[in-house]
Image (cartoon, grey):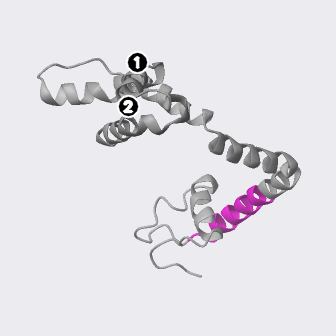
């Protein structure tokens, strides 16, 4: 909420530089911005946090207002341009991505099965939950296939 407040105050101080408010004086531009719908949503999204900190009252949860504020990002041309590029890449490469996903799933299933059947003896300390079933070894296979780690303890291989 403090970051929202700082961002809000910075926008309020520089609003007269915006093309929409250039013909107005600084005070008029700030007042017009304060009375706009998006500005009121911004205020409602962070002011209750400060009220709860300063006063002993418990206010209702207004998290949904913050979600409304996030939807403003989708109106930004630079963000929407990037989202459009990502959507086009996913659309034109969907067949390649589907094949890669299928190959990944086959490798994970194969590696999980191999790990399950090569499991260390049941009395090995620290490995009780790692090798109890093929789905349980899927986490280990993903970690090993991505190079992120390996099972701990003394392994027979």
Q: Is residue 112 magenta?
A: yes
Considering depth in this image, is 114 or 19 the residue closer to the camera?
A: 19
Residue plotted at (69% across, 66% down): 111
Considering depth in this image, is 57 or 7 the residue closer to the camera?
A: 7
Q: Is residue 87 magenta?
A: no
Under circle 2, the secondary element is helix
How far across and how far down the image is residue 100, in percent? 80, 58
How far across and how far down the image is residue 156, in percent? 56, 80
Residue plotted at (87% across, 49% down): 92
Which quadrant does the N terminus fall into? top left
Q: State which quadrant residue 63 falls in.
A: top left
Camera-near label (2 vs 1) is 2
How far across and how far down the image is residue 139, in percent? 57, 59
Q: Which residues are magenta?
A: 103-119
Under circle 1, the secondary element is loop
Which of disc 1 and disc 2 is earlier in sequence?
2
Examine the residues drawn in magenta and state their main secondary structure. helix
> Which label is found at residue 26?
2
Considering depth in this image, is 144 or 45 the residue closer to the camera?
A: 45
Q: Is residue 38 above or below residue 103?
A: above
> Which label is found at residue 100?
none
Left or right: 10 as drawn, with respect to 109: left
* Count of residue discs: 2
Q: CA distance from mark 2 to mark 1?
A: 14 Å
> Which label is found at residue 35?
1
Q: Residue furthest left?
A: 56
């Amino acid at each position: 909420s403090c970051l929202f407040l700082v961002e809000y105050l910075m926008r309020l101080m520089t609003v007269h530089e915006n093309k929409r408010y250039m013909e107005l004086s600084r005070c008029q531009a700030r007042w017009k911005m304060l009375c706009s719908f998006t500005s009121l949503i911004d205020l409602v999204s962070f002011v209750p946090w400060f009220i709860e900190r300063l006063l002993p009252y418990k206010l209702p949860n207004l998290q949904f207002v913050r979600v409304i504020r996030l939807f403003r990002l989708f109106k930004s041309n630079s963000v929407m341009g990037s989202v459009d590029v990502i959507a086009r890449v996913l659309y034109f490469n969907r067949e390649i991505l589907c094949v890669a996903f299928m190959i990944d799933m086959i490798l994970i299933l194969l590696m999980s099965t191999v790990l399950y059947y090569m499991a260390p003896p049941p009395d090995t300390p620290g490995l009780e939950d790692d090798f109890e079933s093929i789905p349980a070894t899927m986490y280990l296979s993903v970690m090993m296939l991505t190079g992120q780690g390996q099972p701990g303890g003394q392994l027979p291989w």
